[in-house]
Amino acid sequence: MKKFSIVMCLALVLSLGTSVMAQDAPPGCPEGLWTLWSAELESACKGELAGTVVTMAGPFVDADEAKFNAAIAEFEGWTGIDIQYTGSKEFEAAIRASVDADAAPDIVDFPQPGLLKDFVQQGKVVDASTFLNADWLAKNYKESWLDMAKMPGPDGDITAGVWNRNNGKDLVWYPKAAWDAAGYAIPTTWDELIALSDQIVADGASPWCVGMESGAATGWAATDWIETIMLRTTSLENYDNWSFPADPANRLPFTSPEVKNAAEVLASIWFKEGYVYGGREAIAGTSFGDAPGPMFDNPPKCYMHKQGNFITSFFPETVTPADYDFFYLPPIDPEYGKPFEVAGDIYAMFNDRPETRAVLDFFSRGESVKAWLQAGGTLAPHNDVQPEWYTNEIERKIATLIAEASSVRFDGSDLQPGAVGSGSFWKGMTDWVSGTADLDTVLAEIDAAWPK
């Protein structure tokens, strides 16, 4: 009897210990997943939501879709939740049709927050702040990311979703061996950048490689430059009111002094004699993908090319990562710090169920994109991402620059109404750069396309 009592006591102690452990670390998920978890993620990690299905839609197809599915596979195994993703090259039209028919997937990946904003204003999107731990979001994201996730709904601002992957735009690429041989130093201020450009001209080459031809999308490379300069020459409030105004009454028009100044700063590089390979007249007709190629001629015909991290895919086939490097495009006005223009994907929830809450919480954590970082081809905005997860040294370096930025803001044209951001803005920049219209006329025409 005594022996039986001892055994029972031991069993009770072990049972209590297991219960305590279950509260501290839900079984099934690794430690990084359950820090400041939501009730639904805790439930999922305990296996209580096994067998449920979460539907998801987005723009990932082909290789990107395979990388996404690989990144979520472990979570599906840990929790038993089946995340069924459908990718589409016609994503925008497809998601508009499904939302309008009240048949939206549970979670949707938006690469252009402007489209998401439309659905938030219609009251179609679940406010993620109603179930995600606020302390967790503040801990795992730079404040700028949280600011960009705030969107106006019918009853006020909501947290429209969580950011899961991103890429950086404020990068200047250069041919490493030729650069080092010439003795050029990496500029850290705008004045140093201009002085370097002047030195390259004096040395007999063009400092900049620029091209903006992109078929029906010709002009977007110029809009990226305008956005980057805006972030360096005016306040975040002005940038937001120009690109993504929460209140139409506060919209900063294209005809404002701030936007015109950004264009004039761009002109001081693109239109200056000797600065761009081929001159101003070649910019509009040179493909954005071909533009960096002359950097790798021997000797280089140009030395610097500003573009996002995706551009390495367009470098000549003979070029290897050892042949190039990059630096952060320097700030212009110190008052505005060291901002970084980004693009990326925000995941929003349309159907409020425990399993969809658990999955969205999962996407707020670096673990959700770990396998993709290891495979290469993306960056992540989460603070809990470990540097060693990046197996690509260039992507690790870019991620560090973005993490160290004083602020981040999304690509402005991607936030603006389609009639402007991928319409009059693209066309206007093309007309201006090619010399068929003056700047004041172009800015007024861009503005006129803004929906009333």
Image (spheres, rainbow, N blue to C red):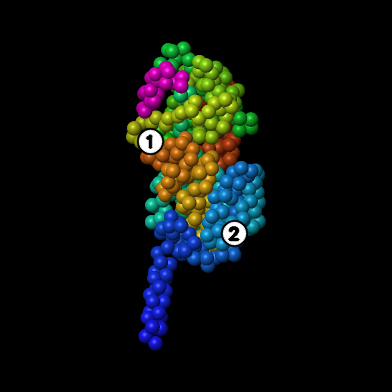
Q: Nearer the viewer, residue 432 or 388?
A: 388
Q: Which amino acid is tagged 2?
A: Asp
Judge from the rendering whether residue 303 lies leftward or rightward of residue 215; answer left or right: left
Residue at 40% over, 64% down = 24
Q: Which amino acid is tagged 1?
A: Lys
Residue 426, given in percent of the width and then of the height, sits at: 57, 32
Give the vertical position of 252 relative to 70 (above or below): above
Q: Nearer the viewer, residue 379 or 78?
A: 78
Residue at 48% over, 23% down = 175
Judge from the rendering whether residue 114 lies leftward or rightward of residue 134; answer left or right: right
Give the vertical position of 378 relative to 46 (above or below): above
Q: Quadrant of the N terminus?
A: bottom left
- Which mark is in front, 1 or 2? 2
Q: Quadrant of the C terminus?
A: top right
Residue 32, given in percent of the width and then of the height, sits at: 43, 55
Residue at 46% over, 31% down = 171
- Dot placed on the residue nearer the N-terminal end, 1 or 2: 2
Residue 118, given in percent of the width and then of the height, sits at: 56, 49
Main secondary structure type of the part rendered in magenta: helix
Residue at 49% over, 62% down = 28
Q: Is label 1 in a helix, a strand or a loop?
A: loop
Q: Which residue is mark 2?
A: 82
Q: From mark 1 to mark 2, how far is it between C-alphas?
A: 41 Å
Q: Which mark is residue 338?
A: 1
Residue 194, given in percent of the width and then of the height, sits at: 40, 21
Q: Residue furthest left?
A: 335
Q: Is label 2 in a helix, a strand or a loop?
A: strand
The magenta-colored residue range is 177-196
